[in-house]
Each structure stands twice: as C-alpha cells, then as structure tokens.
Amino acid sequence: MKLTLTVNGQARSLDLDPRVTLLDALRHHLGLTGTKKGCDHGQCGACTVLVDGRRINSCLALAVSHDGDQITTIEGLGTPDAPSDLQTAFVAHDGYQCGYCTPGQIMSAEAMLSEIAEGWPSYVSQSLEANPALTDEEIAERMSGNLCRCSAYPRIREAIAAVRD
Ligand code: FES
C-alpha cells in the first residue's frame, strides 16, 4: 500500500504491507533507528514519537493509519552540534543510565511540555491554575507511560524540571 509520511519535515514515500507498524516503518523502512522497540506491546514507551505534535506509542500504530501525518522522531529534535533543550538537560542531569529508553523519554517529555502549555490537567494537580508549579509527583504522573529499566527516574524528572523552570 502506498503512503506518504512526513517525517521530521521531510515527505517520505513508502510502499508497505498494511500490517507494518509505524515503529517498524520508521526503523526498518526509513532507517530512523533512534526510536526504540522495547516491549512492542504499548507498555514501555520506548517507541514514543509525535504525530501532529501528540505523543503516541508507535508500536501500536499502523503506518498506513498515518498517511499524510506529520511525524517527529528523536532525530528531528536536535543535532549533535545543536541539541534541543531537553536533550541538553538530559545530558546535564544524567537523565539516563543505559540510554535505551531515552529517545522515548525525551519525545514524551517534549509532548508533555506542550500539553502543559496548552493547559492539559494531570491527575495529580487536576488544574495547573491551582498548582502552577510542576512538581516531581506531577512529572512522574505525566511521564508514567515511559518506563526506565535502570530506574533513572529521579534524574529524568530533574532534567525535565530544569527545562520547565
Ligand atoms: Fe512501544 Fe514498548 S515498544 S510501548
């Protein structure tokens, strides 16, 4: 099936079996291996990418469902010479250990910051107006879809908080 994904601002034409997931299309058909496959079942968040600015688990999405959509992967956020603010903060705060979950963590945090800017409440605060500070607990709740097998959570949350502050 023919489709076009706009990945990191570049239109990419593909001819895929309709059963191919967005994750496999990115990694195996477009060579964008920054997006990781952890569980392949929607449980770990390693495969998080942005679709039209919203975070999704790309292992749960069929590529054909995203024909025409704007996809952003970790490769689209920054470069080694000019990393994004979140990438810089993750390095500065050691927000990783083995690093396998890091692309998904950063993509998820990127979307999380946009959600907060748009006023999306969390289960912890319910209302950002009532609790404008982004607490450690709130970051943990908003990032709960991203697992870190090494348990670098405190430093991941520190990195995110540093960008928000
Ligand atoms: Fe997609 Fe784990 S690989 S959620």
Image (spheres, rainbow, N blue to C red):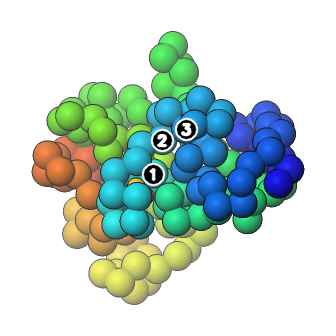
Q: Separation of disc 3 and disc 2 at Cα?
A: 7 Å
Q: Which residue is mark 1?
A: 47
**Residue contact between numbered discs 3 and 2, judged by CB atoms under 8 Å:** yes
Q: Which residue is mark 2?
A: 35
Q: Which residue is mark 3?
A: 27
As drawn, 118 above or below 69:
below
Position of 145 compared to 52: left or right? left
Find ligand 1 in the image and state its quadrant: bottom left
**Relative depth, front residue between 4 and 104:** 4
Q: Image quarter for residue 51?
A: bottom right
Q: Image quarter for residue 30?
A: top right
Query: Given the image, on which type of amino acid does mark 2 rest?
Result: Thr
Q: Nearer the viewer, mark 3 or mark 1?
A: 3
Q: Separation of disc 2 and disc 1 at Cα?
A: 5 Å
**Residue contact between numbered discs 2 and 1, judged by CB atoms under 8 Å:** yes
Q: Separation of disc 3 and disc 1 at Cα?
A: 10 Å
Q: Position of residue 37 (x, y in %)?
A: 40, 47
